[in-house]
Amino acid sequence: MSELLKSMIGWKAHHCRTVKASVIIIASGDPTALIFCIEPCVATDGGGRSYGHGEPIGLCEALTFDSYSTPLSATSTSRLACIWCQ
């Protein structure tokens, strides 16, 4: 499903922000109003799952819940494309 979604969204048309290593991208309890797609670098969540280039972050939580339950941090300086979902 992730691959299908990536092909349907023009990520480059959305607002982007840059975060430094160790910065929390998503905190537990943050609203799922934003879906992030990580660009050149990698991030890991609280469960040890890694996200790489072009991958939507926390997609299942964003589509299912009102808030994220799994925190996510950048492991290096990363660029994030942000999609407002509500």
Image (cartoon, helix red, strand yellow):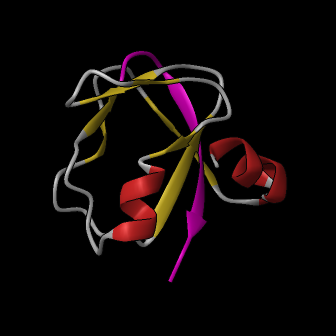
Of the pair 86 and 15, the residue shown nearer to us = 86
Picture coordinates of residue 39, whole percent (x, y):
64, 31
In the picture provided, is 14 more to the left or to the right than 22? Answer: right
Q: Main structural element of the magenta stretch: helix, strand or loop?
A: strand
Residue 84 visible in the snapshot: yes
Of the pair 85 and 6, the residue shown nearer to us = 6
Residue 32 visible in the snapshot: no
Reply yes or no: does residue 80 show up in magenta. yes
**Callout count:** 0
Reply yes or no: does residue 84 show up in magenta. yes
* Rendered position, 28 above or below 39: below
In the picture provided, is 36 more to the left or to the right than 60? Answer: right
In the picture provided, is 39 more to the left or to the right than 51? Answer: right
Tell me which residue sits at (19%, 54%) in the image: 69
In the picture provided, is 34 more to the left or to the right than 14? Answer: left
Looking at this view, name the residue that lies furthest to the front. Answer: 1
Magenta residues, start to end? 74-86
Tell me which residue sits at (22%, 42%) in the image: 71
Looking at this view, name the residue that lies furthest to the bottom. Answer: 86
Tell me which residue sits at (28%, 22%) in the image: 22
Picture coordinates of residue 23, whole percent (x, y):
30, 31
Of the pair 1 and 45, the residue shown nearer to us = 1
Picture coordinates of residue 26, whole percent (x, y):
30, 48
Tell me which residue sits at (55%, 72%) in the image: 84
Picture coordinates of residue 57, whole percent (x, y):
48, 43
* Rendered position, 23 above or below 30: above
